[in-house]
Image: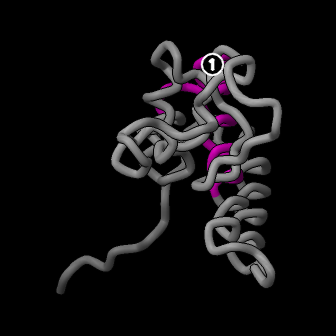
Amino acid sequence: MPKIKTSRVKYPGGWELIEPTIRELDAKMREAENDTHDGKRKCEALWPIFRISHQRSRYIYDLYYRRKEISKELYEFCLDQGYADRNLIAKWKKPGYERLCCLRCIQTRDHNFATTCVCRVPKHLGEEKDIECVHCGCRGCASGD
């Protein structure tokens, strides 16, 4: 008879410290996914989801790299379980990308003339008016701002 697989996940030590914040962000994510998007443009409906995903990844990144409050084991667990975006965190570690909002803003294939998003332009070089990224709603994630 085959062994029965259970879906229980063994949480590493220190999980109880970050669990309330992760659960709160998960609840916000569920609320944003189920929110009606009447009167919004097609791209605007996804902006809250991008913001919450960024917030959750930034929280885990700050705990591990800046404050050093969680272990490597817990950090890897969070990345493996999908609580944080591994590729976005890899970009944050590189110079010039410390404040990057999402990966779509630096992909040249998604923009006209094979450039990056308008939110990557430093504010002192841009125009006077407020700008918003079409992909994620960011108002400026250039490192020089």
Secondary structure type for disc 1: loop
Kindly report the secondary structure that dominates the magenta region of the rendered protein: helix
Instruction: Name the side, left or right, on which 79 lies relative to 126.
Output: left
Q: Is residue 72 magenta?
A: yes
Residue that appears at 63% across and 18% down = 143
Specify whether residue 78 is in view: no
Task: Report x, y in % for residue 95.
Answer: 49, 13
The part of the image, by quadrant, that contains residue 64 is top right
Q: In the displayed structure, would residue 25 be above or below residue 101?
A: below
Q: Is residue 85 visible?
A: yes
Residue under the point 47% across and 43% down:
103
Is 51 in front, or is 21?
A: 51
Relative depth, front residue between 11 and 52: 52
Amino acid on which the number 1 mark rests in the picture: Ser
Reading the image, the residue beneath label 1 is 143
- Establish if 24 lies above or below 140: below
Q: How many marks?
A: 1
Instruction: Tell me which segment is drawn in magenta.
Output: 50-73
Residue found 41% across the figure and 51% down from its top: 110
Residue 11 located within the stretch drawn in magenta: no
Dividing the image into 4 quarters, which one contains the C terminus? top right
Residue 83 vs residue 130, the one in the foreground: 130
Q: What residue appears at the point 58 percent right and 21 percent down from the top-left corner? A: 98
The quadrant the N terminus occupies is bottom left
Pick the front one: 106 or 82 = 106
**Colouring method of the image:** one colour
